[in-house]
């Protein structure tokens, strides 16, 4: 019981409203079973206590997340004779398991990670939602199986799990995050999105019950009469069902088309003004607050703004690493943490526009990737001797073209996908950290069907790697650190399936991304939002590393106290640093990644492991 208490105590930020635990035995007393839970109360505040048990007390459930269609499932189960004593989606999930067993996941629309201990069959079931919106980490060793929503709870279970996984470090250098199933801790792994794991008598079975439809697309033979209208109708429904809540809620509003679309749909279904929350920098050229105000005024929201400085980003970086249990991939993660804390002062749940780019084709790479095959038909000597040097010589403002040409030259799909957003090509990684190269390279991503189009193949990578292992992981940790729940209408699996059933040009048409969303929003949003240039929430790390953070960066990467400098070839690391500091090349993504990896080591992997992020506070 003490061990379960330690594990749930370190997750108090995820559930400050209630806590509970179950302990029991199995296998004639030779097996110890324990479940713990921390609750953030959103639905059925009075009677949703967990762990929740059936009438016999032999089936026990702990559950993180929300089931959006729980009312429909409840009605179906009532027809089958089930009686409910609460109004919670937790009890609906429990009864669904009783009726459908492991296949209950096929009936669920929502975001979830849950565990069911079935004392009748002495079986443990772990399951995770389709896109991995809610996390689930697993550690297995000699005589034990442990699981938790965050890695820090597993470290509280056993300090022996705190061992660096150097093969995951190798993957991190390419992706800027650690792709599933690995983590930076050797004994801890992620349960894949859309999967369940069953334990029985010491044996484990894992099953993938869902894969995004872009992996093996089947186009509808007949289109709806009005595909744009059909899309808008489905988006509206996805937003409405995510507004079910017994506590105050709102939305993150950046002023971009994704979050603006969500806010616009929310106002259709709210009798009171929607609460919206925006964050921006004091420097106007890095801020989108003005655009967010336009949307807030157009839809009469109760608008809140948070203005921060660049120094706030660096000051809170170690804290963000602590909550994420991993390096922070993007500097913009920290503003999300600070905005979550601001929002949590007045609401407990928010809707976001996350997932739109990865399902609708919203990045420049979704345009460029279509030219990979034609570019690779140019003879390699001509590419290497003429095209590549000319592109490398372009100034920084052409960074997207520079990135595109470098990536289009990579013939392997497996290598090219992470490089679109990653820090290093395979050859650059080999030069920097040759001693980390694994003997057997890890397979870190699922291959989509080869007959798929270039657009669908890259979207499939986004939906199975970049999205769950980076963006959704970031979103969950930064919001839950503030005891705030985030919901994502664009990741409604029925909406995603509908979009995937349409021809490619409904997502990317020429150089225009997210075409169908833009067309749908012409019926809804102000023209000034639709036609404005994208600012993006850019943090000027490039300039910081050449200025106020120069000494700090060099000390952490090459100084005597650096814990990661032994990973790298010193001459190659010095070359990268010199090129950036002298302004000859921009290596900000790589240097940010290396700095974060060093900070993670100081927080988690240093001798006498320190879990308190305050001990490594950054000043800039």
Image (tube, grey):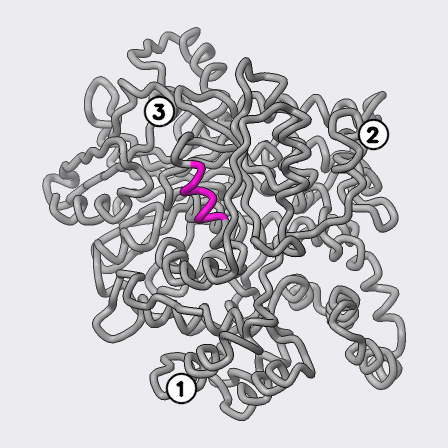
The residue labelled by disc 1 is: 559
User: Of circles 1 and 2, which is in front?
Assistant: 1
Residue under numbered circle 2 = 221
What whole-number distance in Å separates the C-alpha atoms at marks 1 and 3? 51 Å
* Badge 1 element: loop
Q: Which residue is mark 3?
A: 90
Give yes or no for contact between labels 1 and 2 (Cβ–Cβ under 8 Å): no
For the point 42% across and 48% down, the residue is: 477
Q: Is residue 339 part of the magenta span, yes or no?
A: yes
What segment is highlighted magenta in the picture?
Answer: 336-343
- Name which of mark 1 and mark 3 comes first in the sequence: 3
Quarter holding the N terminus is: top left
Residue 452 located left or right of residue 61: right
Q: Determine the residue positioned at 39% across, 46% down.
A: 136
The crowding category of the residue bearing disc 3, from other C-alpha atoms within 10 Å (few below 14, some 14 to 19, many at least 20), is many
Query: Which residue is more in the foreground, 306 or 21?
Result: 306
What residue sits 84% from the left and 80% below the top?
A: 390
Q: Judge whether 590 appears above or below 320 on screen.
A: below
* Residue 519 rendering spot, x and y as whole percentages: 81, 32
Q: Is residue 497 above or below residue 187?
A: above
**Is the Cβ of the residue at disc 1 closer than 8 Å to that at disc 3?**
no
Measured in 3D between alpha carbons, the distance from the residue under mark 1 to the one under mark 2, in whole angstroms, is 62 Å
Residue drawn at (85%, 86%) of the image: 385
The foreground one among 377 and 483 is 483
Say what secondary structure mark 2 lies in: loop
Q: Out of 239 and 288, give the one closest to the viewer.
A: 288
């Amino acid at each position: 019981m003490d061990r379960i208490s330690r594990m749930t105590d370190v997750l108090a930020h995820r559930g400050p409203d209630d806590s509970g635990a179950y302990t029991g035995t199995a296998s004639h007393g030779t097996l110890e079973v324990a479940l713990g839970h921390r609750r953030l109360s959103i639905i059925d505040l009075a009677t949703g206590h967990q762990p929740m048990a059936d009438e016999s007390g032999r089936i026990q459930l702990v559950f993180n997340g929300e089931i959006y269609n729980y009312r429909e499932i409840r009605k179906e189960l009532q027809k089958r004779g089930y009686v409910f004593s609460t109004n919670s989606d937790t009890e609906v999930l429990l009864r669904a398991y009783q009726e459908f067993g492991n296949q209950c996941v096929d009936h669920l629309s929502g975001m979830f990670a849950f565990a069911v201990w079935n004392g009748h069959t002495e079986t443990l079931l772990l399951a995770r939602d389709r896109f991995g919106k809610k996390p689930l980490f697993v550690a297995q060793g000699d005589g034990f199986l442990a699981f938790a929503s965050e890695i820090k709870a597993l470290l509280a279970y056993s300090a022996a799990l705190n061992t660096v996984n150097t093969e995951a470090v190798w993957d991190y250098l390419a992706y800027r995050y650690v792709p599933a199933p690995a983590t930076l801790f050797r004994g801890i792994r992620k349960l894949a999105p859309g999967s369940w794991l069953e334990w029985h008598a010491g044996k484990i079975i894992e099953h993938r019950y869902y894969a995004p439809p872009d992996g093996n697309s089947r186009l509808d033979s007949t289109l709806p009469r009005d595909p744009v209208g059909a899309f808008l109708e489905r988006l509206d429904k996805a937003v409405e069902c995510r507004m079910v809540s017994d506590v105050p809620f709102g939305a993150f509003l950046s002023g971009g088309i994704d979050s603006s679309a969500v806010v616009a749909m929310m106002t259709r279904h709210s009798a009171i003004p929607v609460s919206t929350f925006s964050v921006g920098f004091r420097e106007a050229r890095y801020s989108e607050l003005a655009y967010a105000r336009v949307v807030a005024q157009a839809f009469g929201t109760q608008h809140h703004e948070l203005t921060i400085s660049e120094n706030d980003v660096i000051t809170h970086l170690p804290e963000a690493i602590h909550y994420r249990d991993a390096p922070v991939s993007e500097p913009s993660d920290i503003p999300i943490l600070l905005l979550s804390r601001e929002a949590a002062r007045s609401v407990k749940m928010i809707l976001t526009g996350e997932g739109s780019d990865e399902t609708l084709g919203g990045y420049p790479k979704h345009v460029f990737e279509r030219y990979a095959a034609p570019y690779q038909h140019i003879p390699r000597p001509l590419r290497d001797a003429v095209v590549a040097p000319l592109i490398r010589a372009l100034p920084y403002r052409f960074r997207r073209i520079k990135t595109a040409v470098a990536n289009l030259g990579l013939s392997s799909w497996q290598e090219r996908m992470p490089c679109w957003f990653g820090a290093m090509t395979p050859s650059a990684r080999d030069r920097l950290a040759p001693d980390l190269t694994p003997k057997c390279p890890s397979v870190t991503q699922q291959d989509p069907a080869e007959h798929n189009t270039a657009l669908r193949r890259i979207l499939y990578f986004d939906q199975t790697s970049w999205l769950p292992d980076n963006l959704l992981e970031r979103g969950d940790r930064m919001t839950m650190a503030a005891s705030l729940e985030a919901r994502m209408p664009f990741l409604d699996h029925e909406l995603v399936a509908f979009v995937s059933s349409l021809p490619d040009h409904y997502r990317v048409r020429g150089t225009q991304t997210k075409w169908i969303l833009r067309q749908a929003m012409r019926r809804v949003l102000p023209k000034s939002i639709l036609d404005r240039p994208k600012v993006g929430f850019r943090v000027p790390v490039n300039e910081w590393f050449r200025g106020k953070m120069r000494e700090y960066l060099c000390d952490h990467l090459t100084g005597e106290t650096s814990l990661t400098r032994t990973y790298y070839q010193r001459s190659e690391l010095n070359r990268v640093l010199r090129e950036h500091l002298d302004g000859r090349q921009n290596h900000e993504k790589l240097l940010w990644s290396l700095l974060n990896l060093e900070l993670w080591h100081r927080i988690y992997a240093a001798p006498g492991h320190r879990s308190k992020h305050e001990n490594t506070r950054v000043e800039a």
